Image (tube, rainbow, N blue to C red):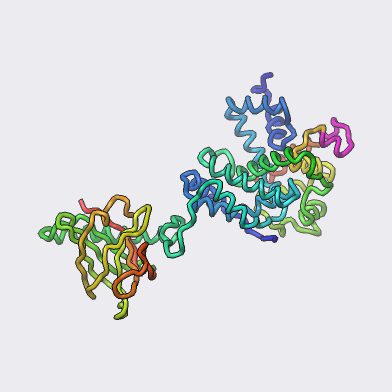
Amino acid sequence: MTSHIPPIDPRQLRAWLHGAARRDSADFRALYDATSAKLLGFALRILRKRELAEEALQETFVSVWNNAASYQSELAAPMTWLSTIVRNKAFDILRRSDGAVEIDGAQFDHDVMNALQDPQATPIEALQMSGDAKALAMCMAALEGPQRQVVGLAFYHDLSHSEVAQHLMMPIGTVKTWIRRSLDRLKKCLEKREHA
Amino acid sequence: MNIRNNPALRDKLAAEYALGTLKGGARRRFEGWLHGDAALRRLTAEWQDRLAPLAEFSTAQAPRKQVWRAIEARLRLQRPASAWQFWRNPSLPFWRTLGLASSAAAAMLVVVLTTRMLDAPMLDYVATLSDDKSQAALLLTADNRHRRLDVRVLSAAPVASDKTLQLWAVPRQGAPRSLGVLAGRRSARLALPASAIGGDVVLLAVSLEPKGGSTDPGGPSGPILYKGNWVRLL
């Protein structure tokens, strides 16, 4: 089941989060309805198996309900906060599953991968994602393939520098440099887009 | 190690923390610094905001229904109210606009009533009930001393001969309280129980019912035609 969901206004998400903090179960449900498909897609990217990904989603929303009051809207965008929780819950499950989840070469979905490799053939503008994600995709596309890959490996698979190095069979020094350089370039590229 | 005066290192660590490559002792140490360093927290949040959209680099997948059911069960959330209890859903924009419109209308009536009816019975509360287009349809006045509730029809749609209008006070929690059926065509006088003007009443509603009133002991059985709320007169 694939669904295309338009990006949601962060102010609306913030209002629902505050509602959840006030123990408003209707707001909490609205937040779930608006974000769960996106967050499940992300959990699936990490865990590969639907049962595990749905478990991560369940843990995420239990945690959101219990911690909504501690959400600081001035510090994090609502989607950032939610996806950070998904990632932590997915990594918990990943650690428990003890290597049962394989790490594949492709870090991104087929369409996204194509768009990152060749934005002329698959326009990033046409991807189903928020403006922030499109900006990041354009900056990711500007990186060289291997540098993009190290960022993806680290972000989606909870790998340390040395684990990324092992996985790619490369010296750890090279991996560290690549990651450092990739992050620097992403930051500069995003800042430039913001001020453009 | 002191990282306060090393902006390049602070940025590098915040980035690696957000990406996830900062692990073990280094990660715990960094979290310790985060605790007492608001600027470092902000720096880290900025990196998290930059990288978080990576979560969207995968196709959205609708979760199966049992996921929500499991969440609901674990958190012991209340089941959503049934369809006719639309006013239980506070996020309905309709209810918000209606609330504003009807309290504005009632506030105007307060002025009219307090200036014109100085010698009239002691009125404690007044309410206008409006239809779904915010047209005022009924005027309610409550006389707490005499325990009387007067309903006057302003512009309500005609009611078929086998139907009747029934007035309800809807509390924040629990079932709506029937205040009685409106027998007259232009006006009706009802008894005013304390529960009709209690502080927990969040809504007054009029439903269209079969002659004799709602067949549902738990609340209205027909559609809600008019809604509004009390305004207290000083």
The single residue placed furthest to the top in the displayed view is B1
Q: Is residue A109 left or right of residue B47?
A: right
Q: How many marks?
A: 0
Residue at 83% from the left image edge and 44% from the top image edge: A144
Residue farthest toward the bottom in the current orientation of the protein: B161
- Can the viewer see residue A185 in this picture? no
Residue at the (82%, 35%) spot, across then down: A163
Which residue does the image show at 62% across and 37% down from the upper left? B45
Q: Position of residue B7 (x, y in %)?
A: 67, 27
Eyeballing the image, is B158 above or below B230? below
The part of the chain drawn in magenta is A163-177
Which of the 4 quarters of the picture holds residue B14? top right
Q: Residue furthest left?
A: B119
Q: Is residue B52 above or below residue B196?
A: above
Residue B44 horizontal/vertical position (percent): 64, 34
Q: Position of residue A114 (x, y in %)?
A: 81, 55
Helix, strand or loop: magenta stretch: helix
Q: Check residue A165 for magenta coloring.
A: yes
Quadrant for the N terminus of chain B in the image: top right
Q: Position of residue A1 (x, y in %)?
A: 70, 61
Judge from the rendering whether residue A62 lies leftward or rightward of residue B230; answer left or right: right
Q: Is residue A123 magenta?
A: no
